Amino acid sequence: MSIHFICRGNMFRSRLAEGYLRKHLPQAIISSSGIDASNGLNGHICWYAQCIADCHNFAQHLSSTWTKTTQEHLQDADVIITLDASITKDVLSRFTIPSHSNILSWNISDVEGVQHDYHHAPQLLQEAGENWNVLKTKLDAFIAFSLPLFVEEIQEGYTRHCQQ
């Protein structure tokens, strides 16, 4: 199963979702991108996302850099998860969703503020933590739903292998 997350800049929500699922669903192909990610505006990952990943022990599963959403990202995805309704609208207007893909829209707030505004670091970290808790709840529910599908997929592959 291939799962692709899309947010605005690929620096917070989608990157955390990607890293968390990579840790908890290692048999899946997980990726992320930002519909408006662009060179010079975004870096590796925002500092508060890195703090969350470090605290929850999945930093080693984060992708190393941001990625801008392209049609190629969507081609092989079985599940495409956008992280708010405005992103869903933008994805549907800019790209063709493959017929085999399921698209889900989760309403996960982004952090309001400038990522390099260290004068407001405690507030940014608190808001990021609250948004992460909402995202993590959705991810945990997704994992609980997806695990039986992976077991079925593995069993079908094993059966095909034994029949050869």
Image (tube, helix red, strand yellow):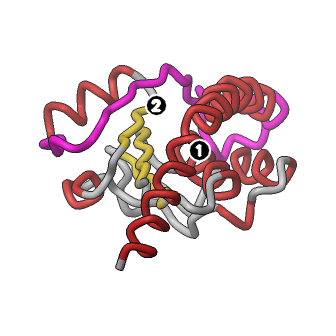
Along the viewing direction, whichever of 93 and 39 lies nearer the viewer: 93
Residue drawn at (49%, 20%) of the image? 107
16 left or right, relative to 57: left
Which numbered marker is on residue 83?
2
As for residue 121 lying within the magenta part, the answer is yes
Which segment is the magenta one? 95-123
What predominant SS class does the magenta segment belong to?
Answer: loop
The answer to whether marks 1 and 2 mark residues whose Cβ atoms lie closer than 8 Å is: yes
Relative side of 71 to 35, left or right = left
Vertical relation: 90 (above or below) 52: above
Q: Amino acid at mark 2?
A: Leu
Residue displayed at 32% across by 51% down: 77
Residue nearer the viewer, 4 or 91: 4
Q: What is the x, y in percent for residue 131?
A: 67, 26
Q: Which class describes the residues within 10 Å of circle 2: few (<14), some (14-19), or many (20+)?
A: many
Quadrant showing the C terminus: bottom left
Above or below, 139 relative to 63:
above
Work out how far the residue at label 1 is from the one at label 2, CA to CA, in angstroms: 10 Å
State which quadrant residue 103 falls in. Answer: top left
Q: Residue at (52%, 44%) from the top-left corner? A: 14
Q: Residue furthest front?
A: 163
- Please name the amino acid that badge 1 sits on: Ala
Circle 2 SS class: loop
Q: Residue at x 55, y 39 (%)?
A: 146
Q: Which mark is residue 17?
A: 1
Q: Residues within 10 Å of mark 1 (few under 14, many from 20)?
A: many
The percent position of residue 97, horizontal first and vertical second, equals 18, 41
